[in-house]
Each structure stands twice: as C-alpha cells, then as structure tokens.
Amino acid sequence: MFTGIVEELGRIKSIARGELTISAQKAMEGTRPGDSIAVNGACLTVIALSAGAFSVEVMPETLRRTNLGNLRPGEAVNLERALAVGSRLGGHLVQGHVDGTGRVLSLTPEGEAVIMRVSVPSEIMHYLVEKGFIAVDGVSLTIIKQDATSFSVSLVTYTRRNTTLGGKRPGDTVNLEIDIIAKYVERLASRGRSTITPEFLAEHGFM
C-alpha cells in the first residue's frame, strides 16, 4: 500500500528483458530484496540492490497496463516505498495497481499552478468524481473538473518540481489508478445491497 506522495525522483540506469535498474538514494534507505517500491505508480518488487541503485522485475501484464514499457535509460521516474504501519497518510490509499493509462491533453497555467487535463479510457472514466482522488504516475491528486472523456488536476509548484509531472507535455502517456473506494462501491451496488455511491462518499468527505 502507498500514499501517492512521491519520495524521490529516480533515474532509469538500465533496461533488460523483464527488469529495470533505477538509480536512487532516499528510496533505498532500509530497502531490501523482496520489498515493494512504486515506480510511476506501479508496485514492483525489488530483486537486487547495488551501490546507488536497485533492480525490479517487470511482468508483461505491467508493461501492457502502464507506461513503463516506454521508459528509456536516463529518464526520471517517481519513486515511493511501501507505506509503513504507523506512518502518516499524506495522500490517499494507493495500491500501486495501475488501472490503465491516459494521455495528457493540455497544460494551462493558472496563477502559480498548472492545470493538467488528461484523457481517460471509458472503462475508467465512470469511476471518477469531482473532488475525488486519482493517482497519476503514482502522484496523489484531486480531480478539480471532469467531462465525458477527461479530467483535470491542478499541479502546484512543489509537485511540478519534485515529480515527473513537471516535465509532461501534451501527448505524453501517464499511469492512472482510481480510488479503491469507488471500486468497492460499484461492487456492492451491483449486488443490490447498498445505496452508497461515489457521489454520496464525496458529499460526505470520504473522497
């Protein structure tokens, strides 16, 4: 489990079949083989450690559902170690299970912030609600606006400087993970045993 609060920008050191090696510092503190680290929001297992770098295994399913297959040596990636019991929850509960990818449509300055609009596959769009959570490349963000095919989030200066989102351009692909609460609500509602909806949860401060 993660929070969507990026700890560090790592750099792709090398790419081999089914394996990524990433240069990092903070994300390696206390990390051991077998631990989980979110790379651009995808939960991956550490399989080896070296001086100033760690390696993770990447399954074909992960490559199909994420933008990790597009990475090249030298590129930056968002890193977050798994949430420790007793830690502060600064973002929202993120599983590291990417639901799909979106595409950056536009970046519009608004005061000190930048509004990023992202296209969303139809199978993900119906889970989203205004003021609800979404993880974009592993970054916990709040949806400020949405339409039938896209959503918008506000990127503050800190987020742009300390995550890969500051370097995104229209056309770039981003990993998306919807709020797990929305999935449970849909599951319960489909069984006819609950009247709770994403809108109800958002209205009462749960999303």
Image (cartoon, rainbow, N blue to C red):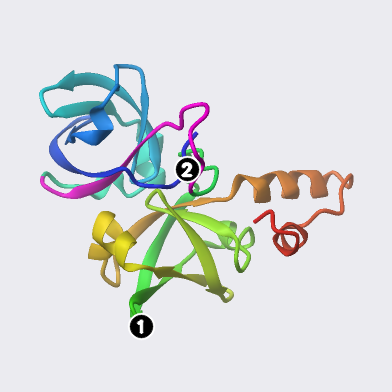
Boundaries of the magenta span? 74-90
The residue at the point 52 percent across, 62 percent down is: 142
The residue at the point 60 percent across, 66 percent down is: 131
Residue at the spot of label 2:
3
Q: Is residue 106 visible?
A: no
Assess disc 1: are there few (<14), some (14-19) or many (≥20) residues with their C-alpha within 10 Å of its C-alpha.
few
Q: Is residue 92 above or below residue 83?
A: below
Assess disc 2: are there few (<14), some (14-19) or many (≥20) residues with their C-alpha within 10 Å of its C-alpha.
many
The residue at the point 47 percent across, 43 percent down is: 3
Callout 2: helix, strand or loop? loop
The picture places residue 197, in percent across and down from the top left corner, at 77, 57
- The image's mark for residue 22 is none
> Can residue 87 be found in the magenta stretch?
yes
The three-letter amino acid code for the residue at tag 2 is Thr
Q: Quadrant of residue 21?
A: top left
Disc tally is 2
The three-letter amino acid code for the residue at tag 1 is Gly
Q: Is residue 128 above or below residue 7?
A: below
Quadrant that contains the C terminus: bottom right
Left or right: where does residue 141 sit relative to residue 200? left
Residue at the spot of label 1:
111
